[in-house]
Image: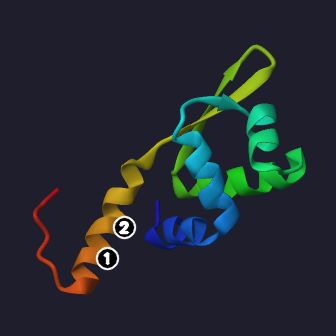
Amino acid sequence: MAINEVLSALADETRRKILQKLREGKINSGELAAAVGLSPQALSYHLAKMKKAGLIYETKEKNFIFYELDLTVLDEAIVWISTLKGEKNDER
């Protein structure tokens, strides 16, 4: 995971909206598309960007794909931002 991919994924308002919805828990792609008001194709584009950044992961159950948050990659971004601000790294 590169911090550039994480920051790029977080920079988009639509992707932040998707992440907010995923905070509520695991959801399948159809329900997620409806909840955030995107076509399945548009949602797929944004999900691919977030998967590449490591912010989400998918699981397959029968004919459905479910998405969940994986925010562990944010630790690196937080450390980088803290360093940029001049804060000391507390060895997370």
Q: Please tell me which residue is depicted at 72% across the width and 28% down the height of the picture.
A: 65
Please state the horizontal and vertical placement of residue 23, each as a whole percent of the image: 51, 41
Q: How many marks?
A: 2
| Alpha-carbon span between mark 1 and mark 2 | 6 Å
Scheme by which the image is coloured: rainbow
**Residue linked to disc 1:** 81
Asked if residue 45 is positioned above or below residue 57 in the image, the reply reads below
Residue 89: horizontal and vertical position, in percent? Answer: 14, 70
Residue drawn at the location 60% of the way across and 59% of the way down = 16
The answer to whether residue 13 is left or right of residue 55 is right
Asked whether 58 or 85 is in front, the reply is: 85
Residue nearest the viewer, comparing 84 with 31: 31
Please tell me whether residue 23 is drawn above or below residue 64 in the rendered image.
below
Q: Position of residue 76 (x, y in %)?
A: 33, 63
The residue tagged with tag 2: helix, strand or loop?
A: helix
Q: Is residue 74 left or right of residue 46?
A: left
Residue 51 in view here? no
- Which of the 4 image quarters holds residue 10? bottom right
User: What kind of residue is marked 1?
Assistant: Ile
Does the CB distance between marks 1 and 2 fall below 8 Å? Answer: yes
Give the residue number, with chain letter if any, for mark 2.
Answer: 77
**Disc 2 residue type?**
Ala
> Looking at the picture, how far across and down is residue 17, in whole percent?
64, 56
The disc label shown at residue 39, or none: none
The image quadrant of residue 59 is: top right
